[in-house]
Image: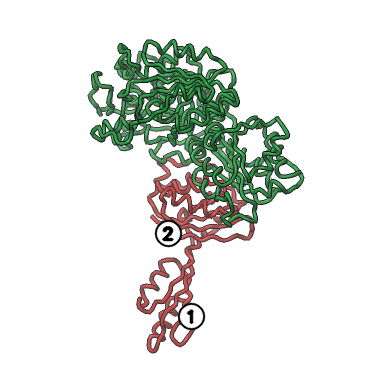
Amino acid sequence: MRGAEIFVQALKDEGVEYIFGYPGGAVLHIYDELFKQDAVKHILVRHEQGATHAADGYSRATGKPGVVLVTSGPGATNCVTGIATAYMDSIPMVVFTGQVPTHLIGNDAFQEVDAIGITRPCVKHNFLVEKVEDLAPTIKKAFYIAASGRPGPVVVDIPKDVTADSCDYYYPKSIEMRSYKPTGRGHPGQIRKAIQLIFEAKKPMVYTGGGIVLDDAAEELTEFGHLTGFPITNTLMGLGGYPATDPQFVGMLGMHGTYEANMAMHHCDVLIAIGARFDDRVTGNLEKFCPYAKIVHVDVDPSSISKNVPVDVPIVGSAREVLREMNQLLREAEFKALDKSRPWWRQITEWSALDCLRYDRTTDVIKPQYVIEELYAVTGGDAYITSDVGQHQMWAAQYYKFDKPRRWINSGGLGTMGFGLPAALGVQLGFPDSIVCCVTGEASLVMCIQELSTALQYNLPVKIINLNNRYMGMVRQWQEFFYDRRYSHSYMDALPDFVKLAEAFGHVGLRIEHARDVRTALKEAMGMKDRLVMMDFLTDQTENVYPMIASGKGHHEMHLAPGNPQPQPSDRELA
Amino acid sequence: MRHILSILLENHAGALSRVAGLFSARAFNIESLTVAPTEDPTVSRMTLVTSGSDEIVEQIVKQLNKLIDVIKLIDLNDGPHIERELMLVKVLARDGGREEIKRLVDIFRGRIIDVTDTTYVVELTGASHKLDAFIEAVNGELIMEVVRTGVSGIARGTRALNVGTPTAAPRSPTKAAKSGDRAARGTVNPAHLL
C-alpha cells in the first residue's frame, strides 16, 4: 500500500470523522487519496491557523482528538499559534504537516521548514516519519500520546516521498511505550489523607479547572460537591465542570472572578484543587495566596503539582478516578455534608450579597454584560459558546451560566485572539443540531475573519455575537487603569461595516444599537437555523470588566465596579 | 545545590534537543551535559549537571520525566555515587618548566600523552573539582587549551539505572519530600534491586 493510502486508511481505523486542512505541494499524494473516499471528511479552511483552531474547538466540544492536515513550510508555520493554543489548554490534537522529500531535508528546499524544531516547545510530542514502514505505527502513537495522560497536541511531519513509497499496511490495535506510561488511579494513601483533611475542614473550598472537563469528570465532581456540601469555584477553563446554577457554586475565581469566590479562597482552611494548575491569573500574588489553607492537589501531570504553590497532599491521577474513590470513601463514612446554616456558608452568603457582578441595567446604551445575559436567556443556557480573547471573553465567562462541561470553549492559557470563529465552526461540525455562538469583539473577530468562507462552504450556521466597542477593550481598560488613560494604539479606527461584511461572505448581518433591541435581535438570529448570522452590537465604549484583582494583589484585595461599596481589604483570619 | 541527573532516553534524532530545549525554555541551569549510546543501541544515557534549590530540581526532574523520549532518570545525589570527568590540557612546556609540569601531573595522577619540544598534552580524569584544582595549580600563562568532557556519573553499590530497572511507584513530592523523602521524587528505589 502506498504511504498516502496508508495515511488515509490509518485515519479511518482511528475513527477520524473530520480532518481540517489546506492542500499544498508536499501533501498532494495524500489529498489525492482523500479525494477517492468519503469516510474521512475534509474541511477546507481558508488559513492554516483556522484549521488548528477549528480542530481544537471540535475536540473541546466532542472530547475526540482534533485532526489537521497542512503542507510543508508556510503551511506548518501558520499552524504554530493554533498548536500553542491547544498545548496551553491541554487539548488533544494531531497535526500532520507535509515535509519536503527526505533527500532534500536540510537543503533549504522550496517550502522547507524545520517543523519539528519550530513546534517542539509547544507540542506534547512530535515525530518525523523517516520511512513508509514507520507511518502507520507513528500515527497510532500520535493519537495515543495526544489523548492519554495530560492531553496535548502532537505533530507528525511526513516527507513527500514517504507518502509515495509502499509497504504492507498494519495498524496496531494498541500501543505500549516504555518511555510513556500515564498515571491513572491516585495513590490510595494520599487519597485517605485528603479525606482526613475533608473531615477536619471548618472552612473548606473546592477549586477545579480544565482537568475536570478534559477528563469528563463533571458528574463525579457534582456528586463530590453534593456529598461534601462544600463551596465550589471553577477556573476560566473549568467552567461547566460544576453546574453554575447549583447553589454551592460561587462563580469563577481569579483576576476577574467573583468577590465571594476570591474571598472564600483567601479565608479557607482546606483547599481542594482538582485538575487546575495554579495559573498566575488565578492565584494573584503567590505570597498572599490562601494563607490559612492546607492544600490538596489532584492532577494527572506530576509537574503541575507544587510548581507554583507548595501543596500538602499531592495526588497524581486522573481527576475522574480520584473523585470516584473519594466519593466512595465519603459515602462509606456517611460524611455529613456542610449545610448552609454553618458559619462558613453564612460568611460566604454575606460576601455574595455584595452582588459584585452588578452593572447599570437602566440605560439604553448596550451594556455588553446585558447582551450575554440575554443570550443566556434566549438560548436557555444550553448553547455552545466559543469566545475570542479580551473583555468579551470575561463577560461571557461571568454572565453565561454554564451547567454542562464542554459548552464553554475559549483560549484560556495562550489567550489567542482569532480563536473564536474557527473554533465555533469545529464545534458546529461536532454538533450540527445545536446552537453554537461565538462571543467576540471587533478586534479579535477580524483576526480569522476569512473563515466566514469555510462556514458558507460547509453550511455551518454559527451565530456571531460581536460586542463592538471600537476598542481593544481589555488593552484600553489596562491603559485606563495603569497608563494614565494614554490609549496607545488600542482604538480600532477604519473598522469594516460588519453587516455588509457578513453579506459579502454570503451570510446574514444584523446591527443592534439599542438595549431595547437586543433580545429581539438575538431571537431573530437564533430563528435562522440554517444561516450564519453576524450580530454587530454597538456597545458602551468604556465599560470595564469588574471585579478585578490588579497584579501583585491578593484574593482579598479586589476592586469592584465604581458605584459599589468597596469592601475593606481584610487579612485577618476568620474565626 | 549541584545535582547530577542520569537520564536514559530513546536514541532518536532530536531527543537531545528536547532536553536542551526544555532547559532553555524553562530557564533551568545546565552546567554540563554528556550523552552517548549505551550497550543497547536504542537507548542513550545522558549525564546532566544542574543546580538549583530543591524545589527547582524537583521541577526539573518532573519536567524531564514528562518528555516522551525520556525512559527513566535518577538524581545521583539521592545516594552515594561516583563522578568522573576527563580533561585534556595543552600546556607550554619549555626549559625548566617542563620538569615542574611533569611533577604536577604526577601529583594529580594524570598522564602526558603528547610531547613536543615546547608543549605537553596532559590527560587527567577525576571529579570535576579535582580538574579545577589542577587548572588552578598550573600557571595560567602556560595553558594553551583546555577540553573537558563534562561529568559522567554512576551510583555506588547495587543501585543501578537501566531500562529493566523497576521504578518506585509514581508518587508525587510532598512538603515532606523537601525534608528528605527522596523516594517521593519518582526516582529509582534502591530497595527494589536488593
A34 vs A75, left or right, is right
Query: Could you say whether the residue bearing mark 2 is in a helix, strand or loop?
Result: loop
| Applied colour scheme | by chain
Vertically, is A10 above or below B160? Answer: above
Residue sitting nearer the eye, B35 or A96? A96
Q: For residue A287, what is the image quadrant?
A: top left
Residue sitting nearer the eye, A241 or A474? A474
User: Quick one: quadrant of the N terminus of chain A?
Assistant: top right
Q: Colour of chain B?
A: red
Query: Could you say whether the residue bearing mark 1 is in a helix, strand or loop?
Result: strand
For disc 1, the neighbor class at 10 Å (few under 14, some 14 to 19, many from 20) is some
Per the image, the residue denoted by label 1 is B112
Cα distance in 3D space between marks 2 and 1? 27 Å
Chain for mark 1? B
Q: Position of residue A68 (x, y in %)?
A: 59, 37
Chain represented in green:
A
The amino acid at mark 1 is: Ile
As drawn, the residue found furthest toward the bottom would be: B95
A359 vs A15, left or right, is left
Mark 2 or 1, nearer chain start: 2
Circle on res. A461: none
Circle on res. B31: 2
